[in-house]
């Protein structure tokens, strides 16, 4: 991976959402719902939801990254897990900020695959090593990405997040 970084600003993120939505619309895919992977996918799902006029947005909480460049062994779904009845027979667009290893997207894709009419994925960035090749990608990169929502440290550090040093 390169030491250089992708720097996404909020303004450029707005451009990315419109471009990504146009690509999805031009492809003829009309999702019944957007399933965002929290946390970074929340921004993407909201942007695409408005641009594609999709109001049915759901959230799936998955933990994988524990810090810059550090991960759990495997991604883990956190409660509440979406009810499969809510996904049944729907055309689902899975939204996330980046397909890095692709393991998180694969977990969510596999969770949906047998229960929905169709599942496709949209990300702002996709890296070459991703296990999942998303149908909709704004930009391909092998760089670390500075997202505007995560480049600054939290304003408050929660007591349950403080780790012994």
Image (cartoon, rainbow, N blue to C red):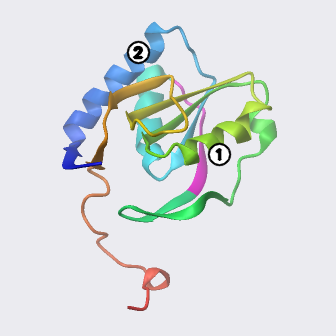
User: Dot 1, how many residues are within 10 Å of its Cα: few (below 14), some (14-19), or many (20+)?
Assistant: some
Rendered view: 144 above or below 85: below
Residue at 65% over, 45% down: 107
Look at the numbered discs 1 and 2 and tell me whether their residues touch, using CB distance below 8 Å.
Answer: no
Alpha carbon distance from label 1 to label 2: 24 Å
Badge 2 marks a residue whose secondary structure is helix
Residue at 30% over, 48% down: 1
- Tell me the number on the disc at residue 69: none
User: Which quarter of the image is occupied by the C terminus?
Assistant: bottom left
Q: Which residue is mark 2?
A: 23
Please identify, in this view, whether the residue under mark 1 or under mark 2 is nearer the observer. Answer: 1
Rendered view: 82 above or below 162: above
Badge 1 marks a residue whose secondary structure is helix
The image position of residue 156, as x and y in percent, is 33, 76
**Mainly helix, strand or loop, the magenta region?**
strand
Residue 139 within the magenta-colored segment of the rendering: no
Q: Earlier in the sequence, mark 1 or mark 2?
A: 2
Q: Which residues are magenta?
A: 54-62
The image position of residue 86, as x and y in percent, is 75, 37
- Tell me the number on the disc at residue 107: 1
């Amino acid at each position: 991976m390169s030491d250089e970084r992708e720097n996404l600003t909020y303004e450029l993120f707005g451009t990315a959402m419109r471009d990504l939505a146009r690509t999805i619309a031009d492809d003829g895919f009309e999702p019944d719902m957007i399933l965002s992977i929290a946390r970074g996918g929340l921004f993407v799902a909201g942007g695409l939801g408005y641009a594609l006029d999709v109001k049915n947005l759901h959230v799936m909480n998955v933990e994988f990254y524990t810090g810059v460049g550090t991960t759990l062994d495997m991604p883990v779904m956190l409660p509440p897990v979406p009810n499969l009845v809510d996904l049944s027979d729907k055309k689902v667009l899975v939204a996330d900020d980046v397909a890095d290893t692709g393991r998180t997207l694969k977990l969510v894709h596999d969770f949906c695959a047998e229960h929905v009419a169709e599942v496709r994925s949209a990300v702002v960035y996709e890296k070459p090593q991703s296990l999942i090749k998303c149908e909709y990608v704004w930009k391909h990169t092998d760089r670390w990405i500075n997202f505007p929502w995560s480049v600054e440290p939290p304003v408050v550090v929660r007591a349950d997040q403080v780790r012994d040093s």
